[in-house]
Image (spheres, helix red, strand yellow):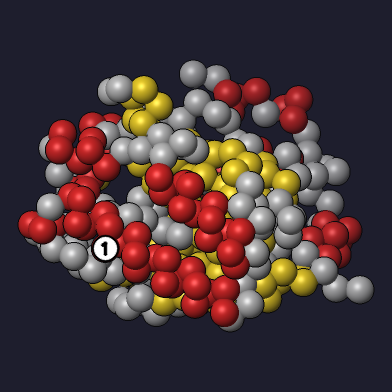
């Protein structure tokens, strides 16, 4: 009997000018996502992931300490508490990417995982932090993650997370597979140009190599005043064979819905025995400095 899970990905344009001030921008984006989460739930979604740093712009386009004011404690801040209420209300699992304050001056790019019923399960902190031109000054804002690659036992299945730039490193994707993940979410903020051709290449490759589902989320549109490039949306789900089964629009708000048969993981792994045939004793070079 098929083990079906309906997933949802939310990509959303910035809905308030940055010149309106951080509190208003944040509140407008939170309000927008509350509505979009409700719409996804109305479509039957059982697990929903939001885009990277969902309640603001991709502020890493500049280096300005004012953006530190967007940080919150996880899980004790107001946004996680709100999302727990929404998860309980809609009976859905939520993956919520946000800007975390661990202690004063120590900040992480984090995703909170909340079970259906509203229970906070834990968090993933982005491991690999880019710092490059034009407009990706992330080391100014984030400390590298220190929680490893956790897998969360949710009501719908075993869920892993890696964030944006992490997707360029296959080792973390493998760690999540070895830890039993059935679906991986990669919330992102990535623009057209250098990396766009990789968008539909790398993550289906992770899905094939590790034989799990992947949900890839990218914000859409241009963000003022920086215009570092077009956030090209196209959020998608792919299956353990690397096939894209649902995809969003390029430049607009969208809710991507897909029905996934988690029993397909066993079927594919019984054909392609990659985990059985691994030779970890030969891979020492991977962890050499």
For the residue labelled by badge 1, is the local secondary structure a helix, a strand or a loop?
A: helix
| Residue at figure coordinates x 19%, y 57% from the top left | 24
| Residue at figure coordinates x 36%, y 38% from the top left | 72
| Residue at figure coordinates x 55%, y 29% from the top left | 147
Given residues 239 and 281, the one toward you in this image is: 239
Residue 17, quarter of picture: bottom left
Establish if 268 lies above or below 101. Answer: below
Residue 261, quarter of picture: bottom right
Given residues 142 and 230, the one toward you in this image is: 142
| Residue at figure coordinates x 67%, y 28% from the top left | 283
User: Can residue 220 be seen here?
Assistant: yes
Given residues 283 and 78, the one toward you in this image is: 78
Residue 220, position in %: x, y? 31, 69
Question: Does 217 sit left or right of 260 as displayed?
Answer: left
Residue 66, position in %: x, y? 15, 38
Establish if 83 lies above or below 109. Answer: below
Label 1, on which residue? 28
Question: Does 238 sit left or right of 104 as displayed?
Answer: right
Residue 100, position in %: x, y? 38, 36
Establish if 234 lies above or below 112. Answer: below
Image quarter hosting the N terminus: bottom right
Residue 222, position in %: x, y? 20, 67
Mark 1 burial class by Cα count in 10 Å: few <14, some 14-19, many 20+: some
User: Can residue 47 be seen here?
Assistant: no
């Amino acid at each position: 009997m098929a083990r079906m899970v309906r997933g949802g990905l939310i990509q959303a344009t910035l809905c308030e000018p940055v010149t309106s001030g951080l509190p208003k921008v944040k509140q407008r984006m939170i309000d927008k996502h509350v509505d979009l989460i409700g719409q996804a739930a109305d479509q039957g979604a059982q697990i929903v992931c939001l885009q990277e740093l969902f309640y603001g712009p991709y502020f890493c386009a500049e280096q300005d300490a004012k953006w530190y004011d967007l940080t919150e404690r996880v899980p004790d801040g107001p946004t996680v508490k709100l999302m727990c209420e929404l998860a309980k209300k809609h009976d859905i699992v939520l993956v919520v990417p946000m800007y975390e304050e661990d202690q004063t001056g120590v900040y992480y790019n984090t995703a909170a995982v909340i079970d259906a019923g509203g229970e906070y399960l834990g968090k993933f902190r982005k491991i690999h932090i880019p710092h490059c031109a034009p407009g990706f000054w992330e080391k100014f804002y984030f400390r590298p993650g220190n929680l490893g690659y956790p897998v969360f036992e949710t009501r719908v299945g075993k869920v892993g997370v890696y964030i944006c730039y992490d997707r360029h490193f296959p080792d973390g994707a493998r760690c999540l597979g070895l830890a039993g993940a059935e679906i991986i979410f990669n919330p992102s903020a990535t623009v057209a140009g250098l990396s766009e051709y990789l968008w539909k290449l790398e993550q289906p490759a992770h899905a094939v190599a590790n034989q799990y589902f992947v949900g890839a989320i990218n914000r859409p549109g241009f963000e003022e005043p920086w215009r570092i490039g077009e956030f090209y949306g196209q959020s998608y789900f792919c299956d353990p064979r690397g096939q894209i089964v649902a995809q969003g629009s390029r430049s607009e708000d969208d809710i991507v819905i897909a029905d996934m048969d988690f029993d397909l993981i066993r079927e594919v792994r019984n054909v392609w025995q990659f985990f059985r045939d691994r030779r970890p004793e030969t891979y020492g070079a991977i962890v050499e400095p």
